[in-house]
Image (cartoon, rainbow, N blue to C red):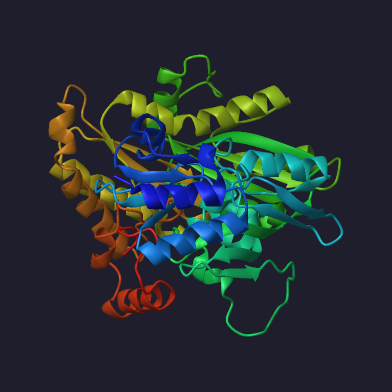
Amino acid sequence: MISDQIRSRLIELVGASYVLTHSDDTAPYAADSRKRWFGKALVVVKPGTTKEVAAVVRLCAETRTPIVPQGGNTSLCGGATPDASGRQLVLSLARLNRIRAIDTVNNTMVAEAGCVLATLRQAADDADRLFPLSLAAEGSCMIGGNLSTNAGGVQVLRYGNTRDLALGLEVVLPSGEVWNGLRVLRKDNTGYDLKQLFIGAEGTLGVLTAAALKLYPKPRAQATAFVALNSVLDALKLLTYLQSRVGDRLTAFELTSDFCLRLARRHFPHLPAPLVGTYSQYVLFELSDTQDEGVGALAESVLAGAMETGLVRDATIAASKAQVRQLWALRENMTEAQILEGAHVKHDISIPISRIAEFIWTCDARLARAFSGIRIVTFGHVGDGNLHYNTILPEGADPAMFLAHSSEINRIVHDTVAEFDGSISAEHGLGQYKRDEILRYKSTVEVELMRALKRVVDPLGIMNPGKVL
């Protein structure tokens, strides 16, 4: 239970309305989005400015109170969930939701950590610019969390991860000091690039309060196509084919198996079948350009060439914005469809693009030998090597018994990922979920370097303890 003294001091700092202590009020902040991790918050504090964040962190440093920074609470790895001790303060950044500046000549935006991603994308659009980070959770995730996990999404192929979109940061350090690194420069060769320490650190080194972000010219034309293929290997051949012919106009390249497509349509029957017939694999790809015309013709031309060689079996190009939304809805609802299907074990992995097909063949076979009837859900951003390689319980199996084998499933998948020189976390982070697992796959030197950084930056160990390390 929080002491009256600390509660009073927090109220002085941010106001009584923004200090939540009743269990009914704190409960939504103490469970992750997947309802897999449940904790108990000492208190939830909702500062409204960077100055208030700094004051709260100074108080926590003084009282040795652990801090769990939280944005939209969309973490899939328990990275923003307090533990069950009831000793950790949840620091909600939701009120830091202002866009401080948009510069259309410099192509930059300065936004606070609590800005919802969809809001930033709309603000950029209103300014006739593009902020390219796009995720299924963009209606609720916040840019601070996106930066803290180095989020990816569907346009990494062209624009890069969140790390690539950040020019500068404002960070409250564990001491309560504020580092103002909100530079909007593309070139700044003045020593260590400190912002990179905090991007992907999942709040374990400090609290991100604002970011300087890159904007791009807004595309004037887009073409979205859904194509059928015989194999994953053919999907990789199609990726190479497209890149050689359309260059960086290729904005997204998403792979999905036939099972994933059927799963999405089973649980979302209003979504139409994009093609007649059944094929092993499908790719949803998008071309975009700042020119008003020509992208549609280019998509038709490259697809015609791919079909002539037999690489593509069938294809459709969206003829309207409504059809574009339907095609993307099939892809975006795959995660929800697997949840509705029943007990599942998720994996967010990356593999060298050239080895993806071999990885899938190998890992599918190993799982099938170990767990008869296991169903494998394979989809993701194959254009940048990121697969969501998930498993669902066999039909008719007991969910509890299936989930009891989660560690064994993870071991097969993660060991195979390591064998193929991949990563067991591509865009979701480590959080609590993979904190211990990562020790099997990182060298002692690498882990100790990370721990050394943590000790130097956060000597009291109060920043998001129990996550990443």
What is the tally of numbered marks visible in this picture?
Answer: 0
Quadrant showing the N terminus: top left
Q: Farthest residue in the top direction?
A: 270
Residue 251 in the image, given as x and y percentages of width and height? 65, 48
Horizontal arrangement in the rendering, residue 276 relative to residue 96 (left or right): left
Q: Residue at x 35, y 70 (%)?
A: 460
Q: Quadrant of the C terminus?
A: bottom left
Q: Where is residue 338? Give x, y as percent.
A: 36, 30
Q: Nearer the viewer, residue 30 or 292?
A: 30
Q: Residue furthest bottom?
A: 191
> Residue 282 at x, y = what percent?
49, 36
Residue 326, above or below 360: above
The structure residue drawn at horizontal position 71% and vertical position 51%, both measured from the top left corner, is 249
Residue 5 or residue 396, whichever sits in front: 5
Front position in the image: 241 or 28: 28
Q: In the rendered view, does 178 fall on the left or right side of 401? A: right
